[in-house]
Image (tube, rainbow, N blue to C red):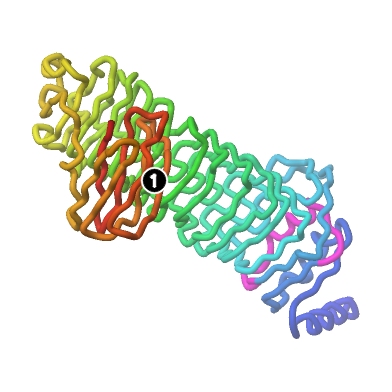
Amino acid sequence: MKKILFIISCIMAVFSASALEIVLTPGRLPDMMPSIKDSPDKEWVLKGVATSADLTALRNLPLAVTSLDLSNLEIKGCEQHTGAWFGQTVFCDGEIPAYMLLGTGVKNLRLPPTVSVIGKGAFSSTPLTELTVSGVKKIGEGAFHNCTELKKAVFSKSSFTDIPAYTFNGCRELRDISLSSEVETVGGHAFEKCGVDKIDLSSAREIGDYAFANATNLSEIGFAYGCKMGEGAFYGASSLEAVIRDSGNTPPLYSAGGVATDFLNVKGEEVGEGAFSRSKASLVALSENMKHVGPYAFHAMPNLKKIVALCDEIPEADETSFAGNNVGSISLYVKRGEVEKWRQAPVWRDFHITDEESGINDVAAESADVEILHRGDMISVSSSGLISEVSLFSLDGMLLSSEAPEANSAELPFPADNDIVIVRVKAGNGIRVVKLK
């Protein structure tokens, strides 16, 4: 017995000089962990071959280990015969098992290029700072949940189509993220309280409840037209500037307390409770088929000056739909000849109602004098300050064209297939949005 202990202690002494290097064969790691868990080394290097079930032994990794290198490890699939691991008995080749490093002290992690699956909660609540991996086909729920020091996550050449619930929840330092171009669904709370500022989800067709809630750095996001949105999808996303497009109904708390855009184009038949509460927009357009505006839907919007009602029928509105606004000072633009009808409608009758064109000179930016004119087939923009952006949108929120002239004037062709366009101009420190026919 003394000889065995002496041999183990000698091996530990050799490894402690640099990193603890362990060459594995299938089934070996779980048996080795009791003898090596007291190693003083902060860096472990695992080589050879191991099964996914073997890697569950890393849940007992000492907190002192801050670096884990698996880049030269071959991970084999297997079937558990002695009991399930969090309900799982079958693993595929290249699978990182669920909760493998949960709560460990690993900051630096290198994975093999053959990783295909990252299991549920695999790296949750670790001080991981960066991860680059290719070829991933599936990510489990909460895989990076509460990785508060994660700054970069790159999934080059990956093909997963689903970002499950809570995947990057609480990753408040995460700025640099590269995802699979094939992502179709984003689960509930997936990026809640995440630090990401720009994200491309151009193939996404469904975004879950509170997916980007309180993602206060988020300023730009892209997703497929007609993408289905969950309740509170952008709740508290206070830096979001891009026009949000949604062909269906607007769910409750959709972007309450968020959205820095000056123009809200509201689609569908219904606006859910509190959907745009405390939004910073000054202009709201309601679609032709709008039928119901829920309680507190446009509550306390300090900049709201105009509502353009394209509605075929007067929508039913709750008495609290516009609570917290001085509705008497907000212009409500309705169709020609329908002013009196709107003046008889509860809630709507309290607005300043007109059927005149919304004009082109009455929403000026504070920091620059901006003039927008429609001349023939061209839209002409001039400003006393430098124009950083001119964008044209259709009434359904589709971006038609955009330029960044960085000059005092610009001209864009009037889109041929549109009778009406929304023009947004950023000049100086202000934004001006107008409707042109």
Front residue of 302 and 94: 302
Residue 49 in percent (x, y) is at 86, 60
Q: Which residue is mark 1?
A: 242
Local packing at callout 1 (Cα closer than 10 Å; few below 14, some 14-19, many 20+) is some
Residue 39 in percent (x, y) is at 72, 76
Q: Identify which residue is drawn at 71% across, 45% down.
A: 137
Front residue of 76 and 54: 76
- Whether residue 411 is visible here, answered yes or no, is yes
* Residue interval drawn in magenta: 47-66
Residue 296 in percent (x, y) is at 24, 32
Q: Identify which residue is drawn at 21% across, 20% down.
A: 335
- Left or right: 373 as drawn, with respect to 129: left
Which amino acid type is marked by label 1? Ala
Whether residue 57 appears in magenta in the rendering, the answer is: yes
Whether residue 337 appears in magenta in the rendering, the answer is: no
Q: How many marks?
A: 1
Front residue of 226 and 134: 226
Label 1 sits on a secondary structure element that is: loop
- Left or right: 172 as drawn, with respect to 112: left
Question: On the rendered image, what quadrant is the C terminus found in?
Answer: top left
Quarter location, residue 164: top right
Q: Identify which residue is drawn at 39% across, 26% down.
A: 249
Q: Residue furthest front?
A: 376
Quarter location, residue 1: bottom right
- Left or right: 339 as drawn, with respect to 212: left
- Whether residue 278 is visible here, answered yes or no, is no
Residue 71 in percent (x, y) is at 76, 65
Quarter location, residue 204: top right
Front residue of 5 and 256: 256
- Left or right: 232 as drawn, with respect to 369: right
Q: Identify which residue is drawn at 70% across, 52% down.
A: 157
